[in-house]
Amino acid sequence: MTPHINAKPGDIAETVLMPGDPRRAKWAAENFLTNPVLVNEVRGMFGYTGEYRGNRVTIHGSGMGMPSLSIYANELIAQYGAKTLIRIGSCGAMQHHVNVRDVVIAMTATTMSTPSRGIMRELNFAPCADFGLLERAVAASRTRDVATHVGGIYSSDVFYDERPDLTEIMTRHGILGVEMEAAELYLVAARHGARALAICTVSDHLLTHEALPAEDRERSFGDMVEIALAAAFD
């Protein structure tokens, strides 16, 4: 056990899907896994382990923001032996051709600061996805009737950002969307020799101000979960 995960040895699968919201972990486990079992509930951060087409998989919440994700990603890899971590979350679109309900697969994750900044010091490390996972996720998205975009995203360390100039710069440089976790996930995975990928469903749009109603979010996130599972196992 760790300070934040009370799962027993062997409870966590080598492949872990990580939504930010623990309730989304519960929803995904109940809808996509066979025989899901609750293996963690410390601080209400639910983790479930079950099977997908005969493969063991854990779906575990990460919390909101890079500091929270860093705690869970580090413990899942270092103490529980996770080897593949796939973020399944939401993002805000930053390009006009990216629409609400579309899926964004992150090749890279730009950031101003992460919890790993102290380790990197003066180095501007470029966090990126595992290519094998990325390649399979893109292939899986092409077999589904869902608009998918592949490219760079921005991991912000604040939710209520008051930097319209920064949004303009990101948009100008082709950043597809903004979220709050992927850059640290890619850094932690690189540090420990694990594989990582971030797949996000667009829940709102920074340019048009369109947003998914709360009740529509779960129904729209199914494609993302299926793509993540296919990337891990197909």
Image (cartoon, rainbow, N blue to C red):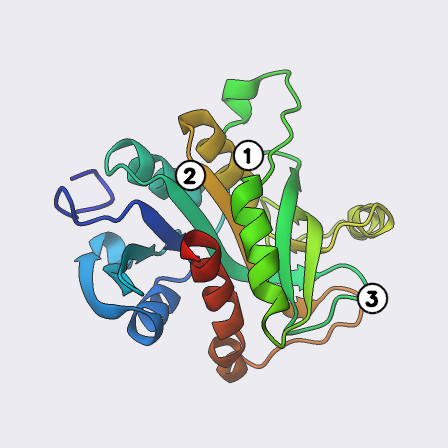
Residue 142 seen from this side: yes
x, y percent for residue 32: 35, 71
212 left or right, relative to 37: right
Residue beneath label 3, please? 96
Disc 3 versus disc 2: distance between alpha carbons? 31 Å
Q: Is residue 221 above or below residue 70?
A: below
Residue beneath label 1, please? 114
Q: Residue furthest right?
A: 172
Out of 20 and 82, give the one closest to the viewer.
82
Disc 2 versus disc 1: distance between alpha carbons? 9 Å
Q: Residue furthest top?
A: 122
106 left or right, relative to 228: right
131 left or right, relative to 4: right
Q: Is residue 190 above or below residue 54?
A: above
Pointer 2 or 1: first along the chain: 2
Circle 2: element type: helix
Sort mark 2 into few (<14), some (14-19) or many (20+) by Cα contacts within 10 Å. Answer: many
Amino acid type, mark 1: Thr
Q: Quadrant of the N terminus?
A: top left
Circle 1: element type: loop
Pointer 3 or 2: first along the chain: 2
- The mark lying in front, picked from 3 and 2, is 3
Residue 70: mark in rendering: 2
Q: State if disc 1 and disc 2 touch (CB < 8 Å).
A: yes
